[in-house]
Structures are given as structure tokens and as C-alpha cells.
Image: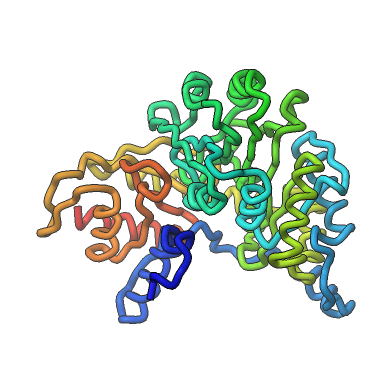
Amino acid sequence: MSNQLSDRINSLVPSATLEMAAKARELRAAGKDVIGLSLGEPDFNTPDYIKEAAKQAIDQDYNSYTPVDGYVELKEAIITKFKRDNGLTYDKSQIVVSTGAKQALYNVAQAVINKGDEVILPCPYWVSYSDIVKLADGVPVEVPTSIENNFKMTPEQLEAAITPRTKMMWYSSPCNPSGSIYSKAELRALADVLKKHPQIIVVSDEIYEHINYGVTAHASMAAFEDMYDRTVTVNGVAKAFAMTGWRIGYIGAPTYIARACNKLQGQVTSGANCIAQRAVITALVESPERINYMVDEFKNRRKLILDLLNAIPGFECNEPDGAFYVFPNISSYFGKELNGTTINNASDFAMYLLEHANVATVTGDAFGNPNGIRISYAASEEEIKEAINRIKAVL
């Protein structure tokens, strides 16, 4: 009875990462030994000092509805974090806490985009960007990047993508799925283009900020004085603090955008979980150095997985500066037949790996780059070794 559903939902594409994870679970339930390298989820537990803060909140009887835009104490912690880590000065009216960074992005899109507005997305981009834009009746404008340029959009490409209908530009740094990080100089060059087009609002997704391997220092677009009033900085605690299930994200934004997001959220989910918010206060006010042990381990895994993948003919990898993904170009396999299966595209390749190697990855088509696949190394070294050995064997 899909004709009874809205055109909006019928045209919506399921999240490729969640869909692949669901297929992997189905195969495991059927007795298959599937290694999941599809989800962007740290395999660490939430640090004890954060869990203790949650336990204290329960004992202190935090159980009531929370303010729509977040507890005042959490907003103050976010303000402190933005100042300490990013050199950004916000007041409480500019902060909105949401049920995950994904909701924060959705809120911004619904609050800003009108029908037909164009949103520039450097490719590859996080899987949900395009469909969040479409749900707001916007038009995603994909700007292809290359592995040779470390998957980063150039100022020339940005200028060429801008039209009178351009309303926003969205990007992530460190990038999901490529792990690329825009340097301060590279962001400044993009800002020099944007300052000629004052109607364009920037969404800077910085949720992988702390998973940085020290090659390129983190920089925020909003730190430039001429971009501050037109940039929405999105962040959260899911990745760096191993708190994916706690579902807390937040924005720092121009006041009028923050108020609009608050207004929307009040009619959709209201305030985020009370216990999670109290725990996040502790996560943000404590030094980010307390999570360095996770970053160090991800760095070791990055070297391991790159060494293994580079030993497989047909895999072309860049070296990610951050996050915990590799995004190899595997287009050399297109048109070839493997074990009776013809590989026409990245989706065929990812499904082949799932069915023949019992390894779950994600097709690059979902990220706006049809030549690659995303492989998460947020898994143990033993799982990574076994997974890549399986992949090598079936190729």
C-alpha cells in the first residue's frame, strides 16, 4: 500500500550504513560469521568518569522533561568547549542540544531551506546529508573530489558550483567517509569564495574533531570573523567519547537559526534525554586528553588496515588524517567477474564482499562517490586482520 504513503517517504532512500548493518545482523542470525566494518561506531566503552556522572544524575532524580534546547548547565559546558577547543565565542541563545548530531543537521535543514534551494555537498559526504536536504525540499549539488586531492573541494570547484539558487554549503572535517581534514588555510580559501556570496550559509560538521592524528590541525569555519554570522557548527559526543547510543548532539549558530531550530524541535522531539545530558556535561568540561587512549588506538589501526589494503591489487587508498574510516578506490574491479559475479559498480562490490567474504562495508554510491567503498576500522586488530584477509582471498 505504498500509494497510501507520502511522496516524501516513498522517495526517501534508507540509510546505507544502517541498511548494511541490518543485512549483516540477518546473516549472523542465519549462522554466518560476519565481520561488521560498516557502522561508524567506536568499539570502546563509554569512559567510566562519564558513566559515573550518569549514575549520579539518576541518584539525584533527574527524570523530568528537559528544556527543549538543553539544560542551562550543558549549554554552558558546550560554550566552554567551543571556546577552549575552537576559539569560538557563543552565548546560550546560540546553542541547541538535540537527540544526536543527525537531528541537529535535520533541524538546520528544515529551519533554513526552502523548496528549490541548492545545497553544495563536496563528495564524498556523509550518507544522510543528501536525503536530509531533499526532505527539506532542497536540491543537493554534488561536487566530486578525487583521491589525488585527498577528497577535498577546491575554491575553484566551489565557485563553479554556486548559482543564484545556492543557499547552503555542508561539509564535514574530519570527513566521514574519507578521513580528510581541511586545514585552516584551505578553509580560508573556501571562505574567500563564500564572502562574495553573502546569501550562503555554511554547515560545518565537526563531530570527528578529536579523532585527529596530528597531521592537520583542526580548524573551524566559524573562527573566521567574516564567516561567524553565517556558519552553523555541528558537533556531538557519539564518536570521540564512544557515546553513540546516548544520542546527544548540538549546534553553535547565529541566534536566529538557533531559535528556529529550538522552535522546530519543540514540535518534534522536545528536549533530549535528561540522564544523557547530565553525563555529557562531564564529558565536555573534562580535558579532551582523557580520550587520547582511543585516538592512539585508532591511529594504530589506521596503519594496520592501510598496510593490509595496500597489499591487495586494485585498492587505491589515501591516508586519512582523522576519523576512523578508509575510503579506497576500487573501480579497477568494475566490469570484472569474480566467482561468477559481475562487478558493475561499488554497490555490487560491497555486496560481493558481504556474500563471499562475510565482511560488511558500505558502497561509495551512498556517499556521492561511485568509485569507492567505506571501511570502518573501529574494530579490534584481530577483526581487521581477519576481515582484510577474507577480502583478499575472495578477490
How far across and how far down the image is residue 352, in percent? 24, 59
**Camera-nearest residue between 129 and 44:** 129
The quarter of the picture where residue 214 lies is top right
> Residue at 38% of width from left, 27% of height from top?
148
Q: How many marks?
A: 0
How far across and how far down the image is residue 263, in percent? 77, 56
> Residue at 85% of width from left, 75% of height from top?
62
Q: Is residue 158 left or right of residue 364?
A: right
**Camera-nearest residue between 143 and 219:** 143
How far across and how far down the image is residue 256, in percent? 79, 43
How far across and how far down the image is residue 389, in percent? 28, 56
> Residue at 63% of width from left, 40% of height from top?
203
Q: Is residue 256 left or right of residue 240?
A: right
Chosen colour scheme:
rainbow
Q: Can the viewer see residue 14?
A: yes
> Residue at 72% of width from left, 33% of height from top?
230
For residue 279, above or below residue 163 = below
Q: Can the viewer see residue 382?
A: no
The quarter of the picture where residue 1 lies is bottom left
For residue 164, above or below residue 96 = above
